[in-house]
Amino acid sequence: MSMPKFDNVSVTKKANVFFDGKCVSHTVHFADGSRKSVGVIFPAKLTFKTGEPEVMEIIVGSCRIKLPGEAESRIVTAGSSFSVPGNSAFDIEALETLDYVCHFG
């Protein structure tokens, strides 16, 4: 899953800005029709809602997450990822500036 770059893609130029600028991403479109978002979360505690299943890949930084059905939160660091079910929500606390890739579907 962890590739240093994406080749042969198109990028939506308009940024996705969430939570008053605490999370900013761009959507990357692949030739096969799939998409991902590449972004940054600044130090904050946020709750994201999902429409479809997602895999969040942490590129730089660390965060505390609490996923649906989990009793306790846990720390996720650079080089790790976590899965989130579709039509759900999860809590994330960026403990430092976090670079991530969100893989949809």
Image (spheres, grey):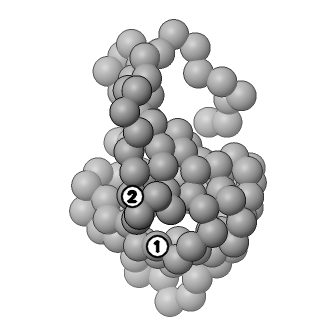
State yes or no: discs 1 and 2 in contact (Cβ < 8 Å): yes
Mark 1 vs 2, N-terminal side: 2
Look at 59% across and 21% down and name the residue there: 6
Between 94 and 83, the one nearer to me in the picture: 94
Label 2: how many Cα within 10 Å (few below 14, some 14–19, many 20+)? few
Examine the rendered structure and indicate whether residue 66 appears above or below residue 12: below
Quarter in which the C terminus is drawn: top left
Q: What amino acid type is highlighted by mark number 1? A: Leu
Quarter in which the N terminus is drawn: top right
User: What residue sits right under mark 2 in the picture?
Assistant: 18
Residue 39: x and y in percent read: 54, 45
Query: Quarter-wise, where is residue 12 in the image?
Result: top left
Look at 50% across and 62% down and name the residue there: 22
Residue 95: x and y in percent read: 69, 72
**Residue 37 visible at all:** no
Q: Hey, which residue is sitting farthest front in the picture?
A: 20
**Residue 53 visible at all:** yes
* SS state under label 1: strand
**100 horizontally vs 46: left or right:** right
Examine the rendered structure and indicate whether residue 86 appears above or below residue 104: below
Look at 67% across and 36% down and name the residue there: 2
Label 1: how many Cα within 10 Å (few below 14, some 14–19, many 20+)? some
Between 19 and 47, the one nearer to me in the picture: 19
* SS state under label 2: strand
Residue 15: x and y in percent read: 41, 39
Examine the rendered structure and indicate whether residue 62 appears above or below residue 67: above
Q: What amino acid type is highlighted by mark number 2? A: Phe
**52 horizontally vs 80: left or right:** left
What numbered label is drawn on residue 76?
Answer: none
Look at 25% across and 62% down and name the residue there: 87
User: What residue sits right under mark 1 in the picture?
Assistant: 46
| Gap between marks 1 and 2 measured at Cα | 10 Å
